[in-house]
Image (cartoon, rainbow, N blue to C red):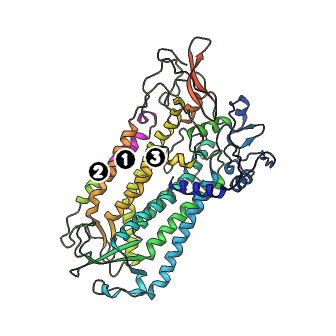
Amino acid sequence: MCWQLVMYLAGTALACGSAVEPLHPTSVQLREDHVTRNCTDNRDKEVVSLNSSEHKYSLVTLFNHIRSVRSVSNSTPSQRSHGTHTLPYDVGYPYLAHSGLVFSLLVGISCIGIGAIIFVISPQFDIPPGLTSHVPSWSPGTERNITIPMNHYVNVTLGLAFNFLVTVCTEATGYVHGTTLKWGLVQEQRLEFNANLRLFSATKGAFSVNGPVVNILFLISIVFSYAASASVLFRLNIYEDGTDSLQHHPSLWHTSSIAKSYSIISFLPVLILGIALTLQAVLGLIAYHKTTVHTWSSSPLDVSSALVHHGCMKHRSDRCMRSAASTDDTTAIRPSPHQPKPWACHKSVSRVVYLVWITAIVFLILPWAYKFNPKVSGYLSWDGPTWNGFAPPLAVLQGSLIVGIVQALITVSLHCSELVTTLARDEEVWRAATSAKGAQPSANPLRVLFGSWQTCGLVLWKPVLHWIFGLSLSLQVTSGLVLSTVSLALGPGIIVVAVFVTYIANLKPPGPQPAAYGNVQVLADLVDEWWETMYWGHKGTKLWGASHAGTSSGPLPPVGMGLVYA
């Protein structure tokens, strides 16, 4: 989601200075003839008319209208013209999705190029004189790395910056992967919720663009992109007594006795990072161009409206008070003062909570699973790969594989935690229908990023946790794989996520408005009129006596707690 902020600001800058009349949607009630289209259509057969006498377009808007002629998945205005009507949903920001993929691809290719350059020019660099006694077996022709003086704090801060960069790229590719997967499941009539565990949900066909093989490749590339980013800069500190960081290492943050600090850049971690990011971007680009996406909006209301509009599902009567926990029950009931929690509405939430707690326990125990090494003060370590020299490539590859395997548990746990926060975000979008401002299905990327404290908190904490892991289990230039005392903070850091996810999973929304949590069929049942801004409440009494609740373009009276609704 971080990438959306960057690309949104870039798009806004391009549009500045133009006299733009934005295409605001007309509040149009959904009609029965809108449900006649087949949701498996791969092409939209209507051509958008660009009438310069009716609208003035910025360069960005014009560019996106031209792209919309190709397919529905690449249409970009706020709501695209549909014959004599406007679509009752926002088609989102496909140009941001495409720009995010291009950005990730450029970062990946750049890393591959930098790794290749280091491989070629490294034999020309001599080891700094002050390090000769610390690495007597250094061989510039075989180890392919560059050593540069760098402040200790700068090295640590750059490690955090690399993790944020990886997060931006993986969020960009993940957004496209998740959206195309969602619409792939729609075509197979298997989509239930707006939010999905994208790495563990797949379309039919092992080698389809969102099939199991692609999911496995995404998972591997995400894990090793974080693992490689932690090994881009090796640290080596020389202390005032002449020892180095492998013979004497006080606490990471107490560096008063450090005389000199060096950073060693090996070509291999940079190359692995580039390959991982490039692979994600390429897979995302293939899915982007091969999948028909009716809306790129993250709003569950937009997705549900698009599904109804294109005939993928229909509004079902007598369910105006049914939540996601009882979607198939049509019995008339009285409103409940509290709604079911996410745990009770989505079968995967309990599994996610258990997984995160298991991960937290594992990393609480891990630092004590290996005996203390008296030769390296302040470290816990075990026998890793044999390192003969100064960050030899083969040993770096072996160490990176071990780090990636261990880090996979954290990566998977954080990925699964996104399901819980997204469910909470989707519910907030729907519950706004009883507020003074109403529910607004169309949300720009800034509102997606900052509008939900749950999603924003997890996205910001994710790179920090990977950074802590990189400081905990790291590769040292002359000794190999080392588990430092920083790992003592890793378990508590994951516990923060576990408590956070558990709390959200057990929150019961107050009020009689049925909880949907992004369940697209439930939203299609609860919404009987689609508007740009919707309000939910009491709408009258049916002929046979039961009351009816639904949506409107203006505020509605609250539902009666003593009335029976169907």
Point out which mark residue 361 bears: 2
Q: Is residue 214 visible?
A: no
User: In this rendering, which labeled residue sits more in front, label 1 or label 3?
Assistant: 3
Nearer the observer: mark 2 or 3; the answer is 3
Ranked by sequence position, the earlier of labels 2 and 1 is 1
Q: Which residue is mark 3?
A: 455
Instruction: Tell me which amino acid carries mark 3.
Output: Thr
- Please provide percent x and percent y for residue 191: 57, 40
| Residue 278 percent coordinates (x, y) | 55, 65
- Report x, y in % for residue 382: 26, 68
Q: CA distance from mark 2 to mark 1?
A: 10 Å
- Is residue 343 on the magenta stretch? yes
- State if disc 3 and disc 2 touch (CB < 8 Å): no
Q: Specify the segment rendered in magenta.
A: 340-359
Q: Residue flagged by tag 2: what amino acid is it?
A: Ile
Q: Nearer the viewer, residue 227 or 17?
A: 17
